[in-house]
Amino acid sequence: MSNLSAPKGVDDPSWLAEIAHKQAEAADLLGRPEDEQQESGYFHTLREILQQPATWLATGDHLASMSGELLEIVDGAATLVLTGSGSSEYAGDCVRLPLQNRLKIFAQTVGGGMLLTHGGRAIAPSRPGLMVSLARSGDSPESVGAISIVLETEPGFRHLVITCNAQGRLATTYRDDPRVKVVLLAEQTNDRSLVMTSSFTNMVLAASSLGSLRAPDQYIALVQGLAQKADELLTTHLDTLAAVARQDFHRAVFLASGPRLGAARESALKMVEMTAGKVSAMSETCLGLRHGLMSAVHSDTLIVCFLSSQPLVRAYECDLIRELNEKQLGMAKVIFGEGIPPDLANDGDVTIDCSGLAALGDDNMPVLDVILGQLLGLFRSMKEGLQPDSPSSDGVINRVVQEFRLHRAAE
């Protein structure tokens, strides 16, 4: 295990220095005066991406210490609902299938907006249920509105809130409500950048702990293994991804299967957010791409493939990648996985082959997959002359979704 097995605080500069020592892009950006970094608009986003391995360890320890009280909330639930909006909804996508299989109960991801418009009709009928609300700030209109509706209309539901902001409305409104358990993650995970990076992955890891409440030591070991792999990714492949991001593509498609599709959805969103839409992006499964969306893979398209380690899933994914090669679709590919078949990559493609991914398991890969999407979005944003900390210069989108009117069904 790397030195990450002894967690360092994110205020300890050594975790930045290690990456800067091994990756020229990080050395250049971090070596500039802080006021220049702030003025260039990447100060927060870069650090919040790079701090993820350190913050994961703290989140793992924190959730493991809560395993007993969380077990009381989970036990007996017949339905699990994961809810959030935007990136927080995609975080739910990353853990839905693994939690369903580990807890042996039906699980679904329901966007906060869907709960506002359709309430309990959007939720599977089995009761009692557990609703897990995920939110970075907990201040978006959907956050409190969604949980409020379910509290009012679905008495058979327990509630767990996972948030990064102790001062957010989602945390403060329900802090003393016996029907709601609030889990606060470390303040460092409350990203100051407009885009969610470390908040996303830490919420995924926190929610995934619900599947390991009877084995907290195994959960801690898993988080340590993921943190080590994330450290390796950052200290080995950051420069490579920066070079890819500067290529002349105008579209990106992120391909994945199972729970990793949540990471693909989040990666596509990061590309769109950080480039203010100058690069269009979409996500899909490898099997799903054939159903029409393949027609959008043009010569200006970057294809990013999160390659499964499961033999059956990988067989379908490799067939699709080979079909893309045969049809000469896309400008270039980035393939992330372990033991990547050499014939999948053409000249100009990039393979990021990391040993040990199969042992960690596909269910746990989304937090690693999304680091690729975050770095591609960061460096593409800067190539486009934007500021990753606040890429929407005209204020079309904000760090927290602006207030809008909440409607209620007629009595």
Image: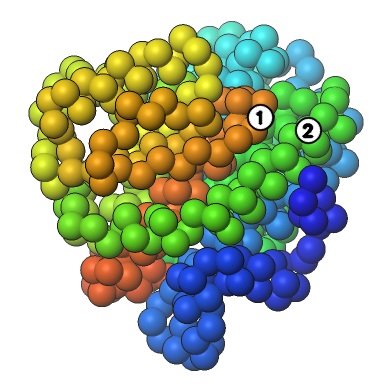
Rendered-image quadrant of the C terminus: top left
- In the displayed structure image, the side of residue 153 where residue 174 appears, left or right: right
Q: Which mark is residue 288?
A: none
Secondary element type, mark 1: helix
- In the displayed structure image, the side of residue 33 where residue 399 appears, left or right: left
Q: Nearer the viewer, mark 1 or mark 2?
A: 1
Image height check: is 68 above or below 348? above
Q: Which residue is at the front of the view, 275 or 334?
A: 334
- Residue 140 in sight here: no
Where residue 350 appears, as percent x and y from the top left, is 36, 44
CA gap, disc 1 to disc 2? 11 Å
The residue lying at 72 percent from left, 28 percent from top is: 210
Where residue 52 appears, as percent x and y from the top left, is 62, 55
Q: State the image quarter where residue 349 is shown.
A: top left
Q: Name the N-terminal-most of marks 1 and 2.
A: 2
- Residue 65 in sight here: yes
Q: Which mark is residue 219?
A: 2
Q: Which residue is at the front of the view, 17 or 21?
A: 21
Rendered-image quadrant of the N terminus: top right
Q: Amino acid at mark 1?
A: Leu
Image height check: is 60 above or below 359? below
Q: Which residue is at the front of the view, 35 or 323?
A: 323
Q: Amino acid at mark 2?
A: Tyr
Crowd around label 2: few <14 · some 14–19 · many ≥20 (10 Å): many
Residue located beneath label 1 in the image: 360
The residue lying at 21 percent from left, 20 percent from top is: 323
Q: What is the image's colouring?
A: rainbow
The residue lying at 82 percent from left, 29 percent from top is: 218
The residue lying at 45 percent from left, 89 percent from top is: 36
